[in-house]
Amino acid sequence: MLRTKTPRPRGGRSRRATAAGKERGDGRSPSGELSRQLEHVSLFSSLSDRPRGAGLTPFEELLEGSCDPALIPSPPPPLPLPPSPLPLPLQQQATPMDADEPAEKDCCILSQDFFCTPDYITPDAPQLASGFDANKENIPCPNSPEKSVCRSKRYRKDCSPKGLCSTDFLGNQRIDPVQLDGLNEDDSEEEQFKESNSHKRGSYVSQSAVALRCRAMPPPCIRNPYLNTDPQIGDDVFGWRQCKSSGFSLSVGDDDLSRYRIDFHEIEQIGSGNFSNVFKVLKRIDGCLYAVKRSIRQLHNDRERRQAVKEVQALAALGSHENIVGYFTSWFENKQLYIQMELCDRCLSKDGNQPLKCGEALELLYQICKGLDFIHERGIAHLDVKPDNIYVRNGFYKLGDFGCATLINRTLAIEDGDSRYMPLEMLNDKYEHLDKFTSLREGKFALLPGCPMQFQSLIKSMMDPDPVRRPSAKDILRQPIFEKLHHEAPAKK
Ligand SMILES: Nc1ncnc2c1ncn2[C@@H]1O[C@H](COP(=O)(O)OP(=O)(O)OP(=O)(O)O)[C@@H](O)[C@H]1O
Ligand SMILES: [Mg+2]
């Protein structure tokens, strides 16, 4: 998800300003100043392309030493160059900006990006060209971005055709290979954009061109199926009609544009599931620890992305509850979904081999039922309750992993959760009781030593093969056994 920023109109150093620079400036207005600067810059390449003496302008003649300098308005001061952290070879590429240096044809083509203001081109990635090392917290302040003076979009000969400089941490923009095959109806807008560009520019298109285009055309909003959308918000806002792509494609995609790397310092991997790896991270801007969950597989088409994003839509629609893992934000990057969440201490399945004591088990059941009741009240069913998906933090048990969440009214597709914990009727595709606790389906379990019979029978009833008799989370919360837990009141209706 890109934070879009509307490009400034004329006068700002945006792409439009670059285009304006192609017009002849008179040197009196700011745009005239810029135009002259641009002419000054681009002259070298045009000079080197043209036969000598063929219709030179006075300015060109001045450079050639054959024109009266008095006829030429004094050149504007050179553009201030930011100090560049780039290693020598890249700085050398920047020398065409210096009129004292001989201009080499191959070094003269400056990317238009050079003329864009940093805040236009890199609001998400201020370190784009700063020689950024992902593993060190050496990122400059977002307000003081540094830009490379030369970012060629040309194919780099020193890259192997396959590698294509997958990530160039030296400051050059990445040049992405365009997938020419494998595009289909579902393929994203970004992929289609790349494809259309490939016809114009050979087989490669700059990532920043995609990013800029995406910023110029904000993505459509995505309707959250778990929420009742305000009827005042028209269908057109959600882009279903005019745009077959959902907008999920508008994502940063490379390490040099990595929101994950820029915003977070990864500390360690703390978990993994069938679909995701989870990392403990430090958020650079606020210094707090979070969990970031990243899908293992790349999600190549819109259908896969829509499916994956349902997890965050459910979390976002639910809002905050002490027994549900906190959700902060999410985005797509490199075709993977990232979810920033509250960091928990551990999950229940990693609680060591010590069986829970009876009081702890009661507390766990009570808290998870509170979380479940909260989500059921909002019309959502979790469908994957199991020890792996119950986390512990500061004495609170929290339900996480909403990857299988669906709507109780069955208007959304149902993805079965872990079959070890699914009730029999769901394995038989019967989904009438989605708000019932799904658990071990045999209904047989060993007695819990030291636990009151009341508790044992409650657990047994939760595993009743008949979903009608099986209690819901709300039913469980009403059980008198929980009154002994010193909770002020059972969960509110
Ligand atoms: N917020 C969190 N805080 C701490 N650990 C977490 C957090 N979220 C996930 N984990 C750890 O990462 C593991 C995998 O996370 P999660 O279950 O969300 O991934 P998944 O691929 O969707 O799993 P599944 O195979 O159950 O579908 C969890 O079992 C847990 O150990
Ligand atoms: Mg899980």
Image: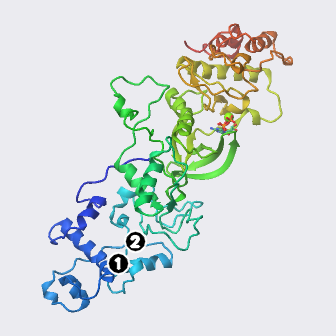
- The answer to whether marks 1 and 2 mark residues whose Cβ atoms lie closer than 8 Å is yes
Q: Position of residue 460 (x, y in %)?
A: 78, 13
Q: Which residue is mark 1?
A: 97
Q: Real-space Cα distance between discs 1 and 2?
A: 9 Å
Residue appearing at x 70%, y 37% in the figure: 346
Residue appearing at x 51%, y 75% in the figure: 87
Question: Residue 345, which numbered label?
Answer: none
Q: Position of residue 227 (x, y in %)?
A: 46, 25
Q: Position of residue 423 (x, y in %)?
A: 72, 19
Q: Is 467 in front, or is 244? A: 244
Q: Position of residue 191 (x, y in %)?
A: 48, 50
455 with respect to 61 (left or right): right
Residue 399 appears in the rendering: yes
Label 1 CA crowd tier, 10 Å (few <14, some 14–19, many 20+): many
Question: Residue 149, which numbered label?
Answer: 2
Locate residue 341: give its quadrant.
top right
Extreme bottom residue here?
A: 66
Locate residue 198: give its quadrant.
bottom left
**Relative height, residue 419 to residue 178 (above, below):** above
Numbered-mark total: 2
User: Please, what is the three-letter code of the amino acid marked with disc 2?
Assistant: Val
314 with respect to 106 (left or right): right
